Amino acid sequence: MTTTAPRLGNALARLLILAAALLGTLLAGAAPASAHAALTGSDPKDGAVVATAPKEVNLTFSEQVALSTDSIRVLDPAGRRADTGEIRDLCSGSVVRYGVGLRAGLPDGTYTVAWQAVSSDSHPVAGAFTFSIGAPSTTSVALTDQAPGGGLVGVLYGIARYLSYAGFAVLVGGGAFVLVCWPRGASVRPVQQTVVRGWLTLTGATLALLLLRSPYTGSGKLSDAFDLAGLKAVLETKTGAALTSRLLLLGAAALFVAVLFGAYARRTDPKEKKDLAFGLGLGGTVVAAGIAGTWALAEHASTGLQPGIAMPVDILHLLAVAAWLGGLTVLLVALHKAPSVERSAVERFSKVAFGSVAVLAATGLYQSWRQVGSWSALTGTRYGQLLLVKIGLMAVLVGIAWISRRWTQRLAETTAPSPTSPTEEAVNADDAPEAEAPEDAEDADGADEASEAEEADEVDEPTEAAASGGPAAAAVDPVRAAQLARQRAAVATARRKRERDADPERAGLRRSVLTEAAVAVVLLAVTTVLTSTEPGRTEEEAGRATSASGPAAVPDRPVDIRLPFDTGGVDGKGVVRLSLDPGRTGSNALHIFVERPNGKPLDVPEIKVALTLEAKDVGPLPVAPDRIQTGHWSASGVQIPMPGDWKIQVTVRTSEIDQTTIDKNVKIG
């Protein structure tokens, strides 16, 4: 019977290339990942000038963080430690605040506060700011340019995260594929090897994450991966507990794999096999959900909005991903290494994949709402952009899966065999009753090889007969024996290839599944990056300084605003942080900090400020700040004549021709 194969065509190839290019652009230009926690306040404030040395420095965060004994450092103008190293927990209710004591008798000058912490969703965050005692001064403090979680350790940690997701998918999805779709696959060696490799990959990646966790959140030095003190500290954290729990659950998963490919594969009694399959399915589901829970309990799902709902949803999402992508991997291996896979198994997996896609759509929609929250965050934040790439890849994957489903239907629609239809005969041979097929795929392969060996022997029969008739018949020629072995192997390979290529339905299914798996690899990479990126909702909330109305200022509380800018020229993007102290009528001190998008100071040729009270037709009142150091400008004696809603306009010039003016309204008095 002649079959017309649906082709993927050039259109799909172009679509895959476009998706890969878009992914590369996003990842190549990506800044190091940040997380939920952010520094929302400090005492002394950033850029503040205090008359006398404070007793301690306090930091306030947007959410709970984990700190070590060296997480907050205060450095004097010469770069020496000015703090006592004793961190105090000042948290009260919903306020997350920590402090560090300062040494007595500190001289006047500019001090640098460098901090590093781990947010509650497991990602490291860090930052620095300055304050001055008496008067600002020059400082020799040079902080590292490496972002938290960056460098070689960050790269290795990211690779281990990717491998852990991939190993989980193959282990869980492969086991589910064998139990639900293809029970005979439990005795097929390539399938066994694939699932076992998934277990080994997840176990090795988990151990690597555990060892790299201390330098990843701390020093950034690879040598610290084997520091026992650091490992002990990691085990006391939420992430360390999750990784340890994962290792314990992997022990139970090893038992599951051993029974699946041991006792279950050897069972011949249908009732016993069914009972054992039920037990394996129940136990395997519990173990798989537990392993998925180690991600949900330690990362994005455990923080932010509705964690009680988000964590179970995240577990379902991970299980659906594993059932689809892991099952797809094992199906691909089965189609290439064990061509005798029954079409009924492919049909069952098609139904499993459809259910997984439905679960992914529902859980993904909830996760997107929870982590993004608005259309502007979907397109204007890095998390939202990566999410759009993921959605696009999912659409491509579903399209290819639809093509695979069409191939599956063609397998099912194949008509009864006829004497002149060898292709149909081969297809129907695959659907022979299971009892008539060999229990072990290796036995079947052995039978094929024996048959092929007989063919090879027939080919070489005259030669061997001649050899046996001679006087040297008793002696075995090792060269001739090796030649015969090569001939038999070549005949066996040619026969398997001929049988496989003679079935266009299975050949087409193999091609579509291979393409599906290739897209899945890229999709898994995007998902890994997405889980370590600051959610769009929190990033947008942190950047709402661009809105027209700002926070109300009260007497004796400085006005602190943040204004992103873009002059359009080279190195023209950044953020202006402005502090007006004490933020009331009368005389105020103005401090301006100009930073690059990555938080580093940006030196600009000129910056100007103007204050306007439009309701009273006052202003604009110009302010010309003086440059203190790179990225830091200040002005003293800035007069606010009356209370009201003042518009603060900041003009930033980054070159001779590139400048922009940004503004924000604040309530003063």
Image (cartoon, rainbow, N blue to C red):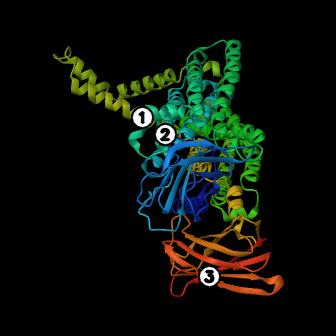
Instruction: Please state which of residues 608 and 476 is positioned toward the viewer in this rendering.
Output: 608
Q: Amino acid at mark 1?
A: Asp
What numbered label is drawn on residue 660? 3
Which residue is the extreme one toward the right? 615
Q: Circle 3: is it few (<14), some (14-19), or many (20+) Cα within 10 Å?
A: some
Look at the numbered discs 2 and 3 and tell me whether their residues touch, using CB distance below 8 Å.
Answer: no
Q: Is residue 123 visible?
A: no
Circle 3: element type:
strand
- Labels 2 & 1 near each other (Cβ < 8 A): yes
Residue 326 at what x, y percent from top left? 60, 37
Q: Amino acid at mark 3?
A: Thr
- Out of 567 and 453, give the one closest to the viewer: 567
Q: CA distance from mark 2 to mark 3?
A: 43 Å
Where is residue 512 drawn, in percent x and y?
60, 48
Q: Is residue 62 visible in the rendered structure shown here?
A: yes
Can you say which quadrant of the picture contains the C terminus?
Answer: bottom right
Residue 100 percent coordinates (x, y): 56, 47
Q: Nearer the viewer, residue 519 or 162?
A: 162
**Left or right of 528, for residue 405:** right
Q: In the picture shown, does residue 159 fall above or below 264?
A: below
Q: Which residue is mark 2?
A: 214
Which amino acid does the dot numbered 2 rest on?
Ser
